[in-house]
Amino acid sequence: MAGSGEGEARQGPNGLAERVPWLARLVTRLAGLVPWLRWPGMPGGRRLVQAVFLVAFVVLFVRMRYPFHPSPAPDLLLRTSPLAPLFFGAADRAVPWAWWPGLVVLALTPLLGRFFCSWVCPLGAMLDLVGERLAPADQARQGAQARSWPAGKFLVLAAVVAAAVAGLHAWFFFDPLAVANRGMTVVLFPLGTWAAQGVAGLLELVPGAGGLAGTLRRSLRGWVMPEGQTEPAFFWFTAVFFLGLLATEWVTRRFWCRTLCPAGALLALCSRFRGVRRQVDSSCVQCRQCSRRCPMGAIPDDDVTATARGECTLCLDCLDHCPVGLRAIGFVPGWAPWPEGMPVPTVPLGFAAVTPVDLTRRRLLQAAAGGLLAAGGARVALDDPRVSSQLIRPPGALPEPAFLERCIRCLACVRVCSSNGGCLQPAGFEAGFPRLWTPRAHMKAGYCEYNCNLCGQVCPTGAIKRLPEAEKQKTVMGQACFNKNHCIPYAKLTDCLVCEEHCPLPEKAIQTHEREVDLPDGSRRKVKFPYVVPERCIGCGICEHKCPLPGTATGVFVVRAYENR
Amino acid sequence: MKRRAFLKMTGGALAAAGLGSLVPGAISPTRAQDAATGQASGPAAATTGAPEVVLVENGEPVALLQAALKEMGGMGKFVSRGDVVVVKPNIGWDRPPELAGNTNPDLVAEVVKECLNAGAKVVKVFDRTCNNPLRCYANSGIEAAAAGAGAEVSQIDESRFKTIGLKNGEAVKSWDIYQDYLEADKVINVPIAKHHGLARVTLGLKNLMGVMGGQRGQIHNPFDKKLNDIAGEILPTLTIIDAYRLLMNNGPSGGNPADVKLAKTLIMSPCTVSADLTALPLFGLQVGDLPYLQEAVNRKMFKFDPARLNVKKLSLS
């Protein structure tokens, strides 16, 4: 992947400008407007847009609950993922129109480069928040001199593509949108609401602030969390993973985006012939501030006139740090001639202009081989029946192999379920690596609300089908079984029937059989013994959830059987 | 620098204390207990001339209520000016009104209006639901109807339960009861008459489970004793049984329109046990068929002697 020559740098592919002059004029005009996107007089228009997208992401997340708001779609921003259309389009051999936000991102990238990363991506915004507000402002973490390994993300991309070709879908573990939503569901939302309640509790201790505390509680309840506090399973590992990812900001600004993010790698590849490039003119005083402050390390320290096209996210921070201001740094069409009197960038171009590393073919092949190996390993790995017999999937989930391919582990279903029955929880290591973070129903944590079909409504990938309510109510997730060793009427010869009471089927799937039994004192008593009518039971698990017996001693439980998927 | 570190540490400790106060149990003492026990002998108990139980048939919910209240002498007999009133419907299930899983929303709204007209300072409506509370409140139609009538409709806050001692408890000696219920001056119990697998029929007494906290499933055995142990301590001022739609089978959750029978009836009594007894013929049952109600009668949890119950029946046409 060596440099492809200097002619390109000096002149660029000029044919376009001659053949489609109107397009060339449009791009030139657009490029000229880029610096103005900072919004003069404001700390940064880019930050404003980024903040709007982050707030929209959070608002859509919070609205992902009962009562359901179908418009705008709660998964709208999840579908900006540029990776998903690639993988799902390839898998389906069809243009994945459902992912139109991601397609828009992909379509704009050849023009604007990795603008997605600093303008749209919610994970990028979270990383910026941490990197700029929390982590100490250390020069060594910023710019071209900071520790990072830009080749890494291409290797990750190569590995996940190779694995996907061989049948193992692992890209979503690194998809920034899925990562962000996973972090929101399991870590940030529970911690955030818990902290807000803590502040309210703290305010109550302050004399005279009781009213304020009440207002805080009410608004929290009214706007953010009408349901109870959520406590997702698999919290600790997810917290370490997600907060650890945010904490990489202490090492290097945008370490994730520089080194690991496969979406960033894909967008970098799309930026190969960027329509709009950064341009430094002769008024540059070579102070190197832009190189040293660039969050992506896209500007080489030894030549500030160069820009790695695949690393630059058009964040415009270089403009903010340029002491000369707009005069030294501008944005021009990719084919615009190099300004008079400026030396042509000395760094090698070609692929190295996309990303400032010597990414060798050998490394890429090694990564792809790793992905293939993982796929092969996953294929020959035996299914662990101790796990598969227990994993109860959401109603409408695709058959298990298709489900595992389709589910991107964004946990939107878990989020929406937490405001309903609350049975869906992320699977942890107990389910094995290929099933990590997939939704599973834990009937002790909650149960499937009979009238709820929201997990399918919010699933961005169709891993859970969008079932109409009436159809969902007939979709079998599993089957209730009585444990007669524990169940109170069987084990203690006395009535209970909490399970039967709660069974939501119009014709109850739990029926009772009344028999007279002999008691130790010689007397006889009539007891109602419950049993399951298999044709009616849909495995919603409310019986297990409401069983008054504790923990694993529950008298009735749902098994993964008879599920229709 | 050192001062800053110290302040940070103190702040952290304070924050921890603040979080600690979230833990339930730190509730200020109330006059709850007296209010709850006092309810059994509300103002209506002293009245003479009014029937002990009113049963009205053949009308729409609002008309049924108005007719019954007229017989009873008006809501003013039960609710005084400035009272804090709790109206306790059954909002237990995520079902629309047509499936008769919950109390009729029009009836609840009219009860709320009557309480406010009688001078109630505030009318609170809540129920500890079996399905998701937001869904139950919305789909039952009760949240919108009651709030529209001027009630303060709120979700149960699990931190606001208070343990009360049950001095006559045989199977259970204490239980958690919702604080707002205990603190209310007057309580109007508005159950819907429904089939129930274990209890046979759920009426006024069983509807009180909606203000009980903890693991309510444990009340199911022995149900007859535990229910009366607890309900006997928290009897309401007035019980209004909604028998407009009866759920005849697959209760208490229901869901099958074929199980719903339009009975267009309402029963009202200041005595919960008397009201429940009067509702039994609607299901073709007698007190002996419902061991828990028999137990309540045996314990003399009534205000009016069941053997000589003065039931005023009237039919609207």
Image (spheres, coloured by chain):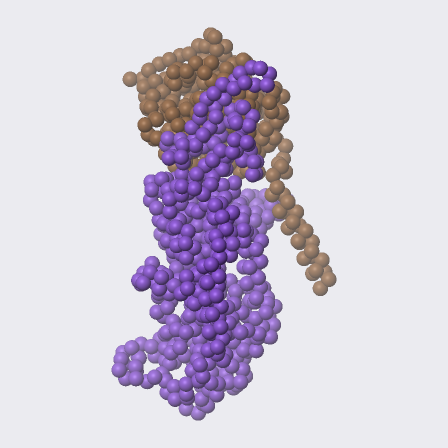
Chain colours: A purple, B brown
* Quarter of the N terminus of chain B within the rendering: bottom right
Image vertical order of residue B62 relative to residue A15, above or below: above
Q: Residue at x 48, y 23 (%)?
A: A528
Image vertical order of residue A24 relative to residue A547, above or below: below
Q: Residue furthest right?
A: B2
- Image x and y of residue A168, in percent: 44, 61
Task: Tell me if I can see residue A524 in this picture.
Answer: yes
- Image x and y of residue A359, in percent: 48, 78
Q: Residue furthest top?
A: B308
Task: Tell me if I can see residue B237 in this picture.
Answer: no
- Image x and y of residue B31, in percent: 61, 28
Q: Residue at x 54, y 24 (%)?
A: A493
Image vertical order of residue A16 relative to residue A262, above or below: below
* Quarter of the C terminus of chain B within the rendering: top left
Labels in figure, total: 0
- Image x and y of residue A419, in percent: 46, 45
Q: Residue at x 43, y 57 (%)?
A: A408
Q: Residue at x 46, y 70 (%)?
A: A368
Looking at the rendering, which quadrant does residue B5 occupy?
bottom right
